């Protein structure tokens, strides 16, 4: 069943504007496109930034940006004036000029994006605004950066990719979990062949969210994240767990998601929780929630590897992203972090992964451990912002590009399609249009 057959098949032969194309034998239009593509890699001495969305996550990212060299925050935007004022005060306190503020309309970000004195626009808004902000930024000539997931629907993913290609701008999804110390250490192990040929991975977002402030207000009003749970059923938040596994498996860079099947359980957790909190007759306790309490999605890649991606946010359970990759020489699994190797009891015995830290610690963490301490989710937030600004400042390709943002995010919508068709297989779009076959894998980047 090909529910997501590439609606842009007709464009494949003419697609010459993407990243990583060879220069030899190009037509004049293609050479012009290549020249524009190189312009997006022009080093930026001081990265001038606009921030859209100054809630809890946006405020945290703003602080990290202000800690970086080569950064100047020029503009901030939010629906709430008090958040804009706090962002302005934080910027001034960091020794920079007061940024211009934009509020209170939903589309005030468009006025921010129209500025000609920005290099990058970052959005930390609710999910439905990620693509509109990114597209507006890129059309105005700015690089776009977004929180996760980058997009909600297949069409949004294509819009994001095509805009980045047309305007030759970066569109980077801030998947911080790719910068965790263990995740980067495992990537280093994989690159050095320590686990052998990778065969299977497991990932997930198992995070009890029933009391999360993005679900309901203190008075019980429905907020944006709960709105998604009310009307959507699938793997709504795949990228945290999937991103690190996808990097290890060279997705978009030697392999590609092929198709998936997805299945959701019944939904009980939110009704029980809100019944206990507000009473069994409360609207939140009696209404129907589309999202199953647990979703399991199974992906097969073009090279025959398999990945399972779990989602569970509505039942009591400790946090886990699973973080498992399995190869012909061994297996690594998270929560707790552990490793089992063919060379140690033929893989029958787990041992602490810390035993291998000295040998396989990622050079970026080895260099910047002290700077990262205490700066967001164990330091991974610091690492992702450091790398983003470093790439823009030096004119190098970001660690994650628009094709990663689209491929990892689209799993949500494709999983919804599978769930709605009794878990039938559904194809995953190839946003690289075949270039995954020749794109080079992500390397082990030094500091």
Image (cartoon, helix red, strand yellow):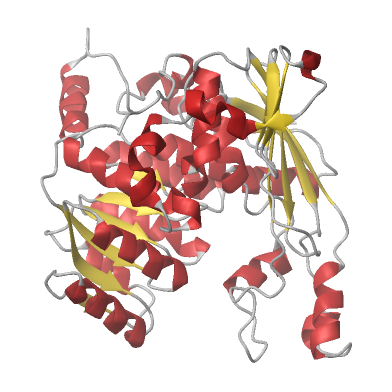
The residue sitting at 40% across, 23% down in the picture is: 443
Where residue 374 sits, quadrant-wise, is: bottom left
Q: Quadrant of the C terminus?
A: top left
- From the viewer's side, name the closer residue of 48 and 130: 48
- In the image, 177: left or right of 282? left
**Count of numbered circles on the image:** 0
Q: Considering only vertical position in the picture, is 194 above or below 122?
A: above
- In the image, 443: left or right of 188? left
Question: Residue 171: x, y in percent?
Answer: 35, 45
Q: Considering only vertical position in the picture, is 31 above or below 297?
A: above
Where residue 32 sits, quadrant-wise, is: top left
The residue positioned farthest toward the top in the image shown: 25
- In the image, 279: left or right of 350? right
Q: Is residue 200 visible?
A: no
The residue sitting at 30% across, 28% down in the picture is: 17
Q: Quadrant of the N terminus?
A: top right
Where residue 432 sits, quadrant-wise, is: top left
Question: Residue 208: x, y in percent?
Answer: 72, 64
Question: Residue 252: x, y in percent?
Answer: 49, 26
Q: Is residue 383 visible?
A: yes
The residue sitting at 29% across, 76% down in the picture is: 87
- From the viewer's side, name the closer residue of 224 and 124: 124
Question: Residue 50: x, y in percent?
Answer: 25, 63
- In the image, 287: left or right of 7? right
Q: Considering only vertical position in the picture, is 287 above or below 279?
A: above
């Amino acid at each position: 069943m090909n529910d997501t057959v590439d609606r842009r098949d007709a464009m494949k032969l003419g697609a010459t504007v993407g990243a990583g194309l060879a220069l030899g034998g190009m037509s004049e239009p293609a050479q012009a496109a290549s020249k524009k593509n190189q312009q997006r890699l022009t080093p930026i001495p001081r990265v001038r930034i606009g921030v859209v969305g100054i809630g809890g996550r946006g405020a945290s990212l703003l602080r990290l940006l202000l800690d970086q060299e080569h950064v100047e925050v020029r503009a901030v935007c939010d629906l709430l004036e008090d958040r804009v004022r706090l962002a302005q005060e934080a910027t001034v306190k960091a020794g920079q000029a007061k940024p211009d503020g934009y509020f209170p309309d939903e589309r005030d970000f468009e006025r921010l994006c129209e500025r000609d004195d920005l290099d990058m626009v970052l959005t930390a808004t609710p999910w439905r605004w990620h693509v509109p902000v990114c597209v507006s930024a890129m059309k105005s000539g700015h690089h776009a950066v977004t929180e996760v997931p980058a997009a909600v629907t297949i069409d949004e993913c294509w819009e994001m990719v095509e805009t980045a290609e047309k305007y030759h701008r970066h569109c980077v999804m801030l998947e911080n979990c790719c910068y965790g110390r263990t995740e980067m250490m495992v990537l280093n192990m994989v690159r050095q062949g320590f686990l052998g040929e990778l065969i299977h991975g497991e990932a997930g977002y198992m995070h009890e969210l029933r009391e999360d402030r993005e679900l309901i207000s203190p008075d019980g009003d429905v907020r944006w994240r709960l709105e998604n749970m009310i009307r959507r059923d699938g793997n709504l938040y795949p990228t945290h767990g999937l991103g690190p596994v996808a990097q290890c498996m060279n997705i978009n860079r030697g392999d590609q998601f092929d198709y998936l099947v997805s299945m959701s359980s019944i939904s009980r957790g939110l009704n029980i929780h809100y019944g206990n909190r507000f009473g069994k007759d409360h609207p939140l306790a009696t209404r129907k929630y589309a999202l199953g309490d647990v979703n399991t999605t199974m992906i097969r890649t073009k090279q025959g590897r398999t990945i399972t991606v779990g989602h569970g946010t509505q039942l009591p359970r400790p946090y886990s992203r699973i973080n498992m990759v399995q190869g012909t020489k061994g297996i690594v699994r998270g929560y707790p972090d552990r490793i089992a190797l063919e060379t140690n009891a033929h893989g029958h015995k787990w041992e602490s992964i810390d035993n291998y830290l000295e040998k396989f610690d990622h050079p970026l963490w080895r260099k910047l451990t002290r700077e990262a301490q205490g700066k967001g989710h164990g330091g991974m937030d610091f690492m992702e912002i450091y790398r983003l600004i470093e790439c823009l400042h030096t004119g190098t390709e970001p660690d994650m590009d628009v094709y990663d943002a689209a491929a990892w995010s689209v799993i949500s919508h494709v999983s919804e399609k599978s769930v709605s068709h009794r878990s039938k297989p559904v194809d995953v779009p190839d946003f690289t249009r075949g270039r995954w076959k020749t794109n080079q894998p992500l390397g082990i980047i030094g500091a």
